[in-house]
Image (spheres, helix red, strand yellow):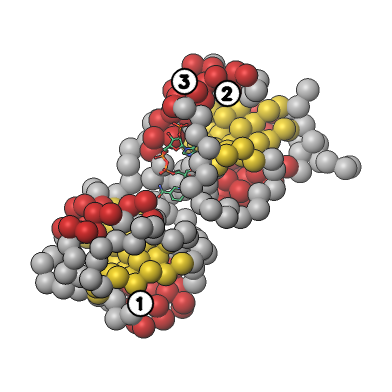
Amino acid sequence: MATRILILGGTTEARELAARLAADARLDVTLSLAGRTANPVRQPVPVRVGGFGGAAGLADHLRARQVDLLVDATHPFAARMSANAAEAAREADIPLLALRRPEWVRVEGDRWTEVESVEEGIERLGAAPRGVFVALGRQEVAPLLAHPQHRYVIRSVDPVEPRLELPQATYLLARGPFRESDERRLLAEHRIEATLAKNSGGDASYGKIAAARALGIEVILVHRPRKPEVPSLATVEEALAAIAHLAGPAEKRGV
Ligand code: NAP
């Protein structure tokens, strides 16, 4: 019988991992999405959408579907889901692997102010009005309302709705990956003086960090939330090797 794998996704890496595992006939892979994005990109394996109803709901799902392996490939800021995954895997008594991309590390020329929360980041912009590029995700922009003196350029995958009651806000819709050259152009065009972002890690959204460095722009960077200590891999390749080890030697589909 095929090894059943449930991947908790919502990231580029989850999609890549699913695509690579789909080629192995011994595996039966499903990808789970929270359902936050209106038009998610096409996925290479069957997808289920929506919350499970907490850790207990996920544990029920794992048992009912006879899942053999749970892979937590959620975004570094999806702390709730990762905590639920750890608890549910324990409850259902199945192995859990996490795919956790390394965080970005400061290099020479970076002007970073590291903060613990979005609220603290907005405080740190200061009282004087500034041009601020906001790349936080549309769920996290409400705290900007506390500091309406700034001129905000807010980028998200789906529209921020309702619009924030801010005197100066421009909304941009775009889905990564973002190239450094394009990000530089954007920062210059909008006369940006500070960038507000999360330390997401990975290549797809690093362009804005490199662009800010090149232009000498301050980046206010929100630290990651703590995630549970579980066996973790940093790359899709490492995750594939660990899964192959758990599932036994791979067989290619159609060979
Ligand atoms: P979160 O705060 O950790 O999760 C909140 C709730 O959403 C969870 O308790 C769970 O509901 C549901 N959920 C989250 N991920 C899910 C998944 N892959 N499949 C099914 N249900 C899921 O997560 P979040 O920060 O809102 O992120 C939601 C999704 O967007 C995640 O899949 C994440 O990978 C992706 N994402 C997040 C960010 C970010 O900055 N936070 C950025 C890019 C992508 P139940 O308790 O009902 O199961």
> Quick check: marks 1 and 3 in contact, CB under 8 Å?
no
Mark linked to residue 143:
none
Q: Amino acid at mark 1?
A: Leu
Looking at the picture, how far across and down is residue 82, in whole percent?
43, 34
Dividing the image into 4 quarters, which one contains the C terminus? top right
Q: Residue at x 61, y 32 (%)?
A: 6
Looking at the picture, how far across and down is residue 153, in whole percent?
33, 70
Q: Nearer the viewer, mark 1 or mark 2?
A: 2
**Is 67 positioned to the left or the right of 218 in the image?**
right
| Element type where label 3 sits in the image | helix
Q: Does 91 sit above or below residue 215?
A: above
Q: Does 84 sit above or below residue 158?
A: above
Extreme-right residue of the structure: 255
Residue assigned mark 1: 187
Residue assigned mark 2: 61
Q: Amino acid at mark 3?
A: Ala
Q: Is residue 96 visible?
A: yes
Choose between 219 and 229: the one closer to the eye: 219
Calculate the distance from the C-alpha at mark 1 to the C-alpha at mark 3: 45 Å
| Element type where label 2 sits in the image | helix
Q: Residue at x 41, y 81 (%)?
A: 185
| Element type where label 1 sits in the image | helix
Mark linked to residue 56:
3
Calculate the distance from the C-alpha at mark 1 to the C-alpha at mark 2: 45 Å
Dot 2 beta carbon under 8 Å from ligand 1: no
Give the class, few, some or many, for how many residues have Cα within 10 Å of label 2's Cα (few <14, many ≥20).
Answer: some
Dot 1 beta carbon under 8 Å from ligand 1: no
Give the class, few, some or many, for how many residues have Cα within 10 Å of label 1's Cα (few <14, many ≥20).
Answer: many
Q: Amino acid at mark 2?
A: His
> Quick check: marks 2 and 3 in contact, CB under 8 Å?
no
